[in-house]
Structure formats: C-alpha cells, structure tokens
Image: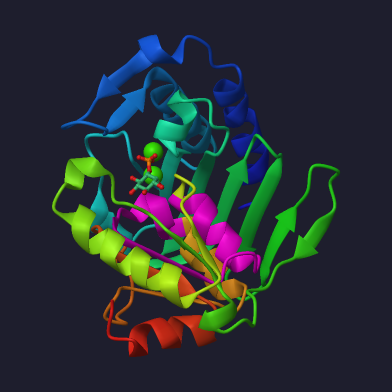
Amino acid sequence: MYEFIPELMREAAKIMLSAHDIDNSIDSKSGDANFVTAYDIAVQNFLYKEIGERLPDAVIIGEESDDNHMEALATKVCFIIDPIDGTTNFIHNYRTSAISVGITDGGRVVYGAIYNPYQNLLYFAERGKGAFVEYANGTVTPIRVSERGLHDALACFGTSPYYREELGDITFERAKWLFMNTRDIRRSGSAALDLCTVASGAVDIFFEYRLSPWDFAAGSLIIEEAGGVITQFDGSPVTLDKPCSILAGNKTCHRAAMESGRF
Ligand code: IPD
Ligand code: CA
Ligand code: CA
C-alpha cells in the first residue's frame, strides 16, 4: 500500500524544483507571513489526484484544502499531507522545504515519509519497522536519535510564525533558555525537516508552540520509530485532529526539557 508514496512524492517535488517567478504566485492566507503559493496548490492537487486514483476510499487531509475531514481520522485510512512544508523558505529560494505525507489508520500514524528535494533525501518509517533515510545515490540506511544529554545537545525550534503574534515572546524565552543550556540552537523554517534532524540524531531536542497535524504527522512516526519521543509540552500525546504544541527529542533531552519546568 505504501510503496507508491515515495515515487509520487519525488514526482510531485519536480513541481517545486521547476518553480519560477514564485513572488508572483504568492497569496496571503490570513494575516502577514502566512503564505501559500501556486506551487503549494499544484503539489497538493497532484497528490490528491494520484492518491485518489489508486485508493479511492482513502480520505485526504491536506493543508491547502478547505474541506478537511478530521472526523474520518478515527475510522478511515487518512493521508495527512503538507504539500510544501517551509513555504517561506520556498518563496525565498532558501532550499530547505519538504513534502510530508503521513498515513493514519484508526487514528494512529502507520506510515510517514518526508522528502527534501533539494538534497534528494527521503526519510520514511512504517510502524513497527523502524525509520530510514534514502540518500541521493539510492542507499537506504536506518536512522536513530542521538544519545546526547541536554548540555551537549544541538537544539532546534520553530517560531509559530508571526501571524501568531502572541507566541513570539514565549517562544523566544524558551529558545533563549535552550541556547543557554545546550551547545547551540538552530531554526530551519521547516518543521517536517526539523523532526527528521531529530530522528537522524543531528539535532537532539526540538520545540514549537503550535504546529498543525500536516506539519508533524509523518515526522511523529519517523521520530518514534527512530527511538525518540514526541509529545505536547505537558507530555500528553500529540493530536492529529487539531493543532498542538510539540516537544520532540531523544529520551534524555525530552525528559530534561520536561523536568526543567520551562515547557
Ligand atoms: C511552517 C513550517 C515552519 C513552522 C511553522 C509551519 P508551512 O509550515 O513548518 O517551520 O515554524 O509553524 O507553519 O506553513 O511552511 O507549511
Ligand atoms: Ca507546514
Ligand atoms: Ca505547507
């Protein structure tokens, strides 16, 4: 059932890589800095069509769709899709964006794939079967979270962009605390890729105050299958039917962040 997904994502990514005149394809969704481009829509349309043809009964929940059927999560096989995660990067040609596809069954993510077309890196996981990366040369390698403690950690965070103005101060307070208590801090502009860096052990701890299911559905399984932990700030499970906070890391760093009382 999952075999066609990576191939489809690589095909969809050609739409991203062929992008030109992006500035003239931008639309603002709600407020400043919440953008969608014609390419986000084109990638999503492509995936809807191709998945729909192969699996007519599957429900597709895509970021750029107006009618998402969250109620189907409990009972149906659902695809949760972010056609371009890192749209602001995409607009700026920062070359750090990805396509993210998670598949749920009975409300649990059972498969996740995140494709970074700029590096031709495909991260994927199937529940119970581990997490992997496929490199540009076709080599497939298992990935694993790191074993570093917080003091030696590389931390990474998302800024819940400025259209959520009220989250600015509390986000940067936590980021400053991590900066002071880890080796260093990063912000990439793609939550899906951030979760892959945690899963592959480059980054040890990640947080963002508010992410939507399409940002983290695939990544949550990739992290868990790589031996990591992903929860909300209070330690409760992430929610696939609505936005939530995300704290992800290896077990040691996740525990240390929770015990710090900062999250
Ligand atoms: C955004 C990116 C970003 C994160 C935002 C997301 P988008 O997704 O993942 O890193 O900080 O919260 O909304 O809008 O580019 O798909
Ligand atoms: Ca996103
Ligand atoms: Ca997006």
**Total of numbered circles in the picture?**
0
Task: Name the residue nearer the viewer: 212 or 70.
Answer: 212
Q: Is residue 251 above or below residue 183?
A: below
Task: Name the residue nearer the viewer: 213 or 259.
Answer: 259
What are the residue bounds of the magenta stretch? 191-217
53 left or right, relative to 40: right
**216 is within the stretch colored magenta:** yes
Can residue 102 be seen at all in this image of the molecule?
A: yes
159 left or right, relative to 128: left
Could you tell me residue 263's position as x and y percent?
A: 28, 76
Could you tell me residue 11's position as x and y percent?
A: 64, 29
The residue sitting at 38% across, 54% down in the picture is 158
Could you tell me residue 143's position as x and y percent?
A: 70, 67
Q: Where ligand 2 lies, by image quadrant? A: top left
The residue sitting at 54% across, 16% down in the picture is 19
The residue sitting at 42% across, 57% down in the picture is 216
Q: Quadrant of residue 38?
A: top left
The residue sitting at 18% across, 47% down in the picture is 164
Could you tell me residue 187's position as x and y percent?
A: 46, 52
Task: Name the residue nearer the viewer: 22 or 141.
Answer: 22
255 left or right, relative to 162: right
Q: Is residue 143 above or below residue 215?
A: below
Can residue 78 be seen at all in this image of the molecule?
A: no
User: How did the renderer colour the structure?
Assistant: rainbow
